[in-house]
Image (spheres, rainbow, N blue to C red):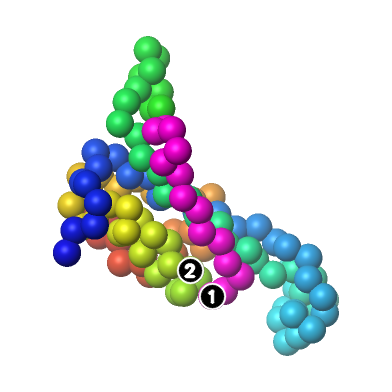
């Protein structure tokens, strides 16, 4: 089933950042330094947007009002599915090109867990 119109380029970006939380939210979690408790939880953020044109210097121009966002504090496996579903809702299965970007290893894990074929 196709939802929406097939897009020429669909960008799916993701990243995570630590958000300070109360102690009960980090109970049983190891901190970044050995022997210290965790003080943050990773908030995973994702956005999906389209681009159909370039400027005079060949830089991509984001389509106005095309960005949707997802965010959650949840395991990578769940967030990967959440972000993949958002991208699928936007583009259906006929996306010509899927560009993805992430700044660390968790982001790449999310892409793989979401079922990306690497095309």
**In the image, what residue occupies the spot 46% across and 74% down?**
78
In the depicted structure, whether residue 91 falls above or below residue 32: above
Q: Which residue is mark 1?
A: 75
Give the image location of residue 84, x and y in percent: 37, 62
Q: Is residue 68 magenta?
A: yes
**Relative side of 20 to 69, left or right:** right
**Could you say which is closer to the camera, residue 49 or residue 97?**
49
Residue appearing at x 30%, y 31% in the figure: 52
Spatial CA span between label 2 and label 1: 6 Å
- Observer able to see residue 105: no
Asked whether, in this view, residue 16 is left or right of residue 6, the answer is right
User: Label 2: few (<14), some or many (≥20) within 10 Å?
Assistant: many
Alpha-carbon neighbours of circle 1 within 10 Å: few (<14), some, or many (≥20)? few
Q: Is residue 90 magenta?
A: no
Please tell me which residue is depicted at 56% across the width and 57% down the height of the picture: 45
What stretch of residues is rendered in magenta? 62-75
Q: Are marks 2 and 1 in contact (CB under 8 Å)?
A: yes
Instruction: Provide residue 41's location: percent of width, then percent of height.
Output: 69, 70
Marks counted in the figure total 2
Residue 81 x/y as whole percent: 40, 69
């Amino acid at each position: 089933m196709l939802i929406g119109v097939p897009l020429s380029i669909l960008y799916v970006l993701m990243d995570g950042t630590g958000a300070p939380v109360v102690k009960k939210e980090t109970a049983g979690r190891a901190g970044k330094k050995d022997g210290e408790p965790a003080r943050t939880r990773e908030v995973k953020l994702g956005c999906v947007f389209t681009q159909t044109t370039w400027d005079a210097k060949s830089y991509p121009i984001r389509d106005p009002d095309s960005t949707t966002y997802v965010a959650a504090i949840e395991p990578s496996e769940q967030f990967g599915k959440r972000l993949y579903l958002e991208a699928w809702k936007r583009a259906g299965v006929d996306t010509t090109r899927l560009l993805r970007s992430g700044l660390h290893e968790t982001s790449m894990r999310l892409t793989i867990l979401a079922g990306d074929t690497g095309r």
